[in-house]
Image (spheres, rainbow, N blue to C red):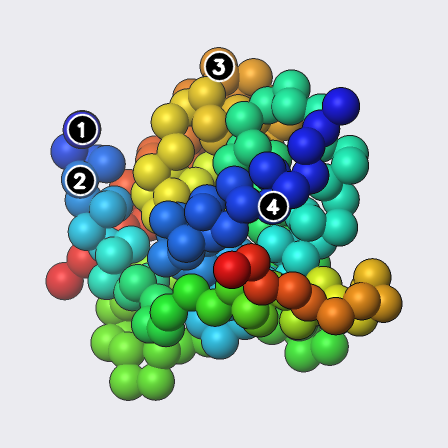
Amino acid sequence: MTEIEQLLREELDQAYPAPVGEPDWDEVLRRLAPARGTQPQRKR
Amino acid sequence: MVDSKLHIEELEALYRRRYVAFVRVASAIAGEPARGADAVHDAFANAIAALDSYRGEAPLEAWVWRIVVRAAASTRLHKERTADALVPEANGDAPIRDESVRKLVAALPERQRLAIFLRYFADLDYRGIALVLGIEVGTVLATLNAAHAALRRMLEEVRP
């Protein structure tokens, strides 16, 4: 990694912190359901 | 013929494995941290709905990144039209310096900005970025070099 890449990574890490929150696949399925006119289904 | 069930399971695995990167890139593109997860959820719902159009010519992850970038950019466009906001919102009590960096990045041409986000937040290699942005690998290199040069100049100006 070059010096500018290292510097940029540090600056960007501070300016754009990693998001908080957990993945929520059910939320994806909920958004899909209205478009398809179906109920979301979880696999078992 | 594409096996949709298999791809949906692959999409879920990709979503879980790369969630933080997807949300981080989407938030940066949207210019609003709170909209990042929203854009990612919309994008994955769109990806499932559009699975029939996936031909396997590019890796599934690159195909999904395209959809995420489009969803996040759409959020940004909507925001610009409704609020004339070009600079990302601050994270509450974020230091002024961090706001300056966000403004510098926001001032870059769109392709440079996207390449920077995909390189640094998603850790995509040049080929991966090329697939997502639909450009040649050489163009990715030139784009990142131009972004680096511009940001280095601008950072030197805001450095204490």
Q: Amino acid at mark 4?
A: Ile
Residue furthest to the front: A44
- On the question of residue B128 being in view, the answer is yes
Residue B8's mark? Answer: 4
What is the distance, in whole Å, between disc 4 and disc 2 at their CAs?
A: 36 Å
Residue B3 image position (x, y, % from top left) = 68, 32
Q: Amino acid at mark 3?
A: Gly
What is the distance, in whole Å, between disc 1 and disc 3 at their CAs?
A: 18 Å
Q: Label 2 belongs to which residue?
A: A6
Q: How many C-alpha atoms fall within 10 Å of the one at disc 1: few (<14), some, or many (≥20)?
A: few
Single out the mark in the foreground, 4 or 2.
4
Residue A2's mark? Answer: 1
What is the distance, in whole Å, between disc 2 and disc 1 at their CAs?
A: 6 Å
Residue B138's mark? Answer: 3
Residue B118 image position (x, y, % from top left) = 43, 41
Residue furthest to the right: A37
Q: Secondary structure at mark 4?
A: helix
Q: Amino acid at mark 1?
A: Thr
What is the distance, in whole Å, between disc 4 and disc 3 at their CAs?
A: 33 Å
- On the question of residue B150 being in view, the answer is no
Single out the mark in the foreground, 4 or 1.
4
